[in-house]
Amino acid sequence: MSLHAPKPAMSAPTRTLVPPLEPGDRLTRDEFERRYAAMPELKKAELIEGVVYMSPAVRLDQHGQPHADLMAWLGVYRAATPGVIVGDNSSIRLDLDNEPQPDAMMIIEPACGGRVKRTDDGYVEGAPEFVAEIAGSSVSIDMNDKLRAYRRNGAREYVVWRVYDEAIDYFALRSGQYVPIPTSDGIVRSEVFPGLWLDVAAMLRGDLAGVLKVLQQGVATAEHADFVKRMDASRVTADGR
């Protein structure tokens, strides 16, 4: 007979289950990120004023094509403007209750005088200089809670393409309020990014060639050249070279 009592069977370590994100969840930003990271199959989720929003399936006419044209416009501007960065569906740590994932954003590199911080884990923290949303079924949130969150945190320009209304709202932040930038000859000229010109009618009708023709006129201006020089000078000063 053995004098030793049998050892109890070793139990498997308890695995911590991460709850899934659900629309309407009220979460802290840290908890939102934890759950989002545990769902790699999920393409888009946002935390707006502490509430989780998740996008439905994306349709070509109502989102895919407008989104592609918007990104082409911003991409061409970026190619002509060293010192800016364009993001497509990138999450932004805006504040403790808001982590939107805008359809597009454009920032000035921090080394060139930009306002945001780029974190070690790859996020943008703070309000970008420019954010844009393609608003179909999301128009209510984009024009209300999300607009207020961007405004409160100081995003300097905010664009909402209201697809069903066939309209593009281009706002600039002035004295703590978003006001529409007035058009000249049907063209909106950015107040933050010199040379970023938008032919609104051409964009709405899907005339990308027309959009880019006007943009090329913008980036050929002296104002755009001066902007690039200023950013380059800021980079040199920051580098000490």
Image (cartoon, rainbow, N blue to C red):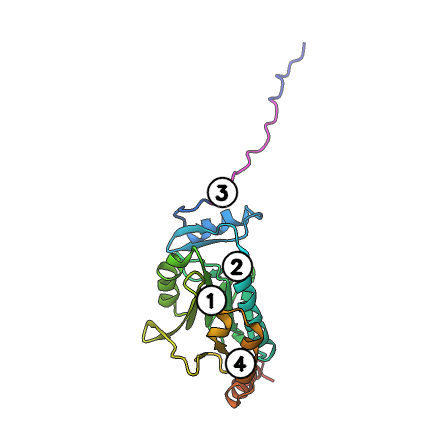
On the image, the x and y values in percent for residue 240 come to 58, 83
Marks 1/3: CA distance? 28 Å
> Which mark is drawn over residue 214?
4
First-in-chain label (1 vs 4): 1
Residue at image coords 50%, 79%: 196
Q: Secondary structure at mark 1?
A: strand
Secondary-structure class at tag 4: helix
Q: Which residue is mark 2?
A: 61
Residue ID for mark 1: 132
Residue 239 position within the rendered picture, expressed as x and y whole percent measured from the top left: 58, 80
State yes or no: residue 20 in magenta.
yes
The one nearer the camera, 87 or 10, is 87
Q: CA distance from mark 2 to mark 4?
A: 24 Å
- Tell me, yes or no, whether the two marked residues, 3 and 2, touch with CB atoms within 8 Å: no
Quick one: label 2 or label 4, which is nearer the N terminus? 2
Q: Which of the two discs, 1 and 2, labels the residue nearer the N terminus?
A: 2
Residue 32 colored magenta? no
Mark toward the start of the polypeptide (3 vs 2): 3
* Residue 24: percent from left, percent from top: 40, 46
Q: Secondary structure at mark 2?
A: helix
Q: Secondary structure at mark 3?
A: loop
Residue farthest along the top direction in this orientation = 1
Marking on residue 20: 3
Q: Which amino acid type is marked by label 1?
A: Ala
Q: Tell me the magenta residue range.
A: 9-21
Residue type at tag 4: Val
Report the residue at 37% width, 64% height from top.
147
Which residue type does callout 2 highlight? Asp
